[in-house]
Image: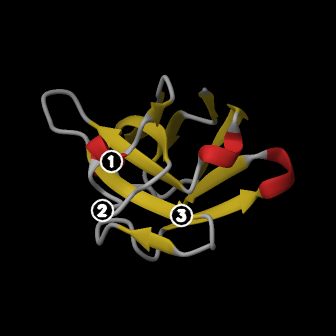
Amino acid sequence: QVQLMESGGGSVQSGGSLRLSCEARGITSRINSVGWFRQAPGKERVGVAAIDRDGMTTYADSVKGRFTLSRDSKKNTVSLQMNRLKPDDTSMYYCAAGSYVADRFLSSEYEYWGQGTQVTVSS
């Protein structure tokens, strides 16, 4: 089993920054991809960014140039640095991990999910 622990959400003003972290615990050798998704009230959950075991990263067009993924393999942690935040970035953010992920922004491809962390950006 794998457990994902998220941290780092909060409230910032437009233009500010936040850093989200996702720590994996358990049988982490099963994980080949880690993704970040977000879901605003009344909207679908959408993929934001993903990183594979080989380090390949993918970003949604809406966050390219503003969000950056990084990982610390020794700490089994993937972080999402979010800069130049906009009110539209306000959402619950979820970390997800999967063993065999073909479509990095398809939530059903991920077996493990964190509890979510709220990000609120005020104008």
- State the image coordinates of residue 24 (x, y, percent, origin top left): 68, 37
51 or 62, nearer to the observer: 51
Relative horizontal placement of residue 81, taking residue 77 as reference (left or right): left
Q: Amino acid at mark 2?
A: Asp
Nearer the camera: disc 3 or disc 2: 2
Whether label 2 touches label 1, CB < 8 Å: yes
The disc label shown at residue 103, or none: 2
Q: What is the C-alpha distance between the residues marked 3 and 1? A: 14 Å
Q: What is the C-alpha distance between the residues marked 2 and 1? A: 7 Å
Within 10 Å of the Cα at label 1, are there few (<14), some (14-19), or many (20+) other Cα atoms?
Answer: some
> Going 38% across and 66% down the picture, which residue do you hit?
63
Within 10 Å of the Cα at label 2, are there few (<14), some (14-19), or many (20+) other Cα atoms?
Answer: few
Relative horizontal placement of residue 19, taking residue 92 as reference (left or right): right
Q: What is the C-alpha distance between the residues marked 3 and 2? A: 12 Å
Q: Which residue is mark 3?
A: 51
User: Reading the chain from its start, which is encountered first: label 3 or label 2?
Assistant: 3
Instruction: Give the quadrant of residue 49.
Output: bottom left
> Going 33% across and 47% down the picture, which residue do you hit?
109
Q: Secondary structure at mark 3?
A: strand
Whether label 3 touches label 2, CB < 8 Å: no
101 or 77, nearer to the observer: 101
- State the image coordinates of residue 82 (x, y, percent, origin top left): 53, 57
> Going 27% across and 42% down the picture, which residue do you hit?
108
User: Reading the chain from its start, which is encountered first: label 2 or label 1?
Assistant: 2
Farthest residue toward the right?
Answer: 74
Nearer the camera: disc 3 or disc 1: 1
Q: Which residue is mark 1?
A: 109
